[in-house]
């Protein structure tokens, strides 16, 4: 075992601003080297940020900010909320303090399980940060992330603003890729943006995995696997369960499914899929049964579809990936039946960013998208109005074999919709 100790000092004030200790095996040094390099990069970037200019003369405030950011990004978020609240109280005019608080409020065990009150506080603090410093891309990204799921245009505008003032902001890049481009069916644009983010934000894993994820949904599985392999080299032995979740999702897109089924036995991944906000106990068994059924008999597919449908109603698995999987096991009627029950207009309007619409636009949802009923579902989700008003049409509208004119149907649905239901 070898231990590396890092510290960042304010030489002028003779004070240590941040320190960390990292240990690893002598005969396998790469994971330790990676951990040390990533922490050093993050802390240095935060420390030299011009946003801390107003508190440079007070090393204790700089140290508190660095500790809060490090805890929020790398420590699971357990102490970052208390640190952020204290920092806001001590430096109320520091935009970065309000952004840190907005980022941490409501987090639980590293997962954002937000109450309405926490979401409102997060948005309020982010807006204060924007008022104090209009160049804070993270604050814009937080406001965008707290919007209702169907607020596509407002989310897009906020994230484009974030990217214009801070092109390398991790949250803005990730949220724009997933919450705007992918969620509105623009997977080609999502892949292109994810390639850009891979270069712009090279040290943040949860931004990097958007590229293989988008490639997987687009059906480019081999290239997605190549990027997963590159990530494993870059972040060896990474304990983040989202890494495993990304690989599981990619390997579940199309056969063979041996890798997906093997990953599904991982205890950490099972725990992730079986606790809120992702799901409940039994969820992983539902997914594994559904994956297996895709290469089995019609009877097996029918049994899996029944299991999957009930699991959605019971909250054991989330709706969007389940609906796409239902389509993939040749049960399009079941997919729309589930959508009609759990994605009614009054329910959709209570959804926020914990739901991922982009599952509907991946290769699993092809059969569903070719059914004319899909456009009515898209209208309930606020997508038809967004497509029609923005001119940003989803990729499937130009897919070969689509049995209806996507834009013509969208125009009719928009014209017939009551003004009060338009987004």
Image: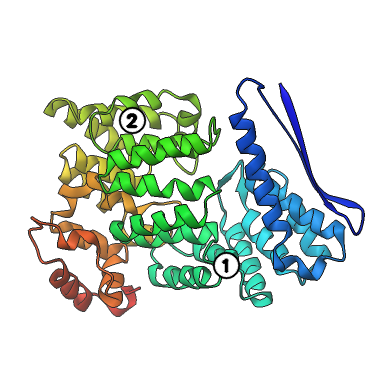
**How many C-alpha atoms fall within 10 Å of the one at disc 1: few (<14), some, or many (≥20)?**
many
The residue shown at (39%, 30%) is 284
Where residue 352 sits in the image (x, y, percent)?
45, 58
The C terminus lies in which quarter of the figure? bottom left
Quadrant where the N terminus lies? top right
Q: Position of residue 134 (x, y in %)?
A: 62, 76
Residue located beneath label 1 in the image:
137
Q: Is residue 7 left or right of residue 331?
A: right
Tell me: 389 left or right of 350.
left
| The image quarter in which residue 263 lies | top left
The residue under the point 30% across, 35% down is 252
Q: Position of residue 18 (x, y in %)?
A: 79, 48
Residue occupied by mark 2: 286
Give above or below for 290 relative to 87.
Answer: above
Foreground mark, 1 or 2, reads 1
Q: Could you tell me how far apart the alpha carbons at marks 1 and 2 are, in whole angstroms?
A: 39 Å
Q: Which mark is residue 41?
A: none
């Amino acid at each position: 075992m070898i231990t590396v100790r890092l510290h960042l000092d304010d030489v002028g004030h003779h004070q240590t601003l941040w320190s960390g200790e990292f240990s690893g095996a002598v005969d396998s040094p790469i994971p330790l080297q990676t951990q040390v390099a990533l922490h050093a990069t993050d802390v240095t970037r935060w420390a030299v940020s011009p946003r801390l200019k107003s508190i440079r003369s007070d090393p204790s405030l700089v140290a508190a900010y660095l500790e809060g950011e490090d805890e929020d990004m790398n420590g699971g978020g357990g102490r970052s909320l208390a640190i952020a609240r204290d920092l806001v109280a001590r430096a109320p005019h520091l935009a970065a303090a309000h952004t840190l608080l907005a980022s941490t409020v409501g987090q639980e065990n590293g997962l954002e399980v937000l109450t309405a009150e926490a979401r409102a506080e997060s948005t309020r603090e982010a807006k204060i940060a924007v008022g104090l410093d209009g160049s804070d891309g993270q604050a814009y990204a937080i406001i965008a992330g707290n919007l209702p799921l169907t607020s596509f245009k407002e989310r897009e505008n906020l994230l484009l603003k974030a990217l214009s003032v801070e092109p390398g902001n991790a949250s803005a890049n990730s949220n724009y890729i997933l919450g705007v481009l992918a969620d509105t069916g623009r997977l080609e644009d999502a892949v292109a943006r994810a390639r850009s983010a891979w270069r712009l934000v090279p040290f943040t894993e949860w931004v990097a995995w958007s590229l293989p994820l988008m490639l997987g949904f687009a059906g480019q599985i081999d290239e997605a696997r190549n990027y997963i392999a590159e990530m494993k080299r870059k972040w060896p032995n990474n304990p983040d369960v989202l890494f495993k979740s990304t690989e599981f999702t990619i390997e579940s897109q199309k056969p063979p499914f041996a890798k997906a089924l093997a990953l599904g036995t991982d205890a950490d991944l099972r725990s992730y899929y079986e606790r809120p906000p992702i799901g409940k106990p039994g969820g992983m068994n539902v997914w594994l049964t559904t994956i297996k059924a895709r290469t089995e008999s019609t009877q097996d597919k029918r049994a899996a579809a029944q299991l999957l449908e009930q699991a959605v109603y019971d909250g054991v698995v989330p709706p969007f990936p389940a609906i796409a999987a239902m389509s993939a096991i040749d049960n399009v009627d079941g997919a729309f039946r589930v959508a009609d029950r759990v994605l009614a207009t009054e329910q959709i309007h209570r959804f926020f960013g914990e739901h991922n619409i982009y599952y509907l636009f991946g290769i699993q949802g092809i059969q569903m998208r070719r059914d004319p009923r899909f456009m009515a579902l898209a209208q309930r989700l606020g997508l038809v109005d967004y497509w029609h008003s923005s001119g940003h049409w989803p990729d499937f509208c130009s897919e070969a074999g689509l049995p209806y004119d996507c834009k013509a149907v969208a125009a009719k649905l928009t014209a017939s919709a009551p003004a009060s239901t338009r987004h």
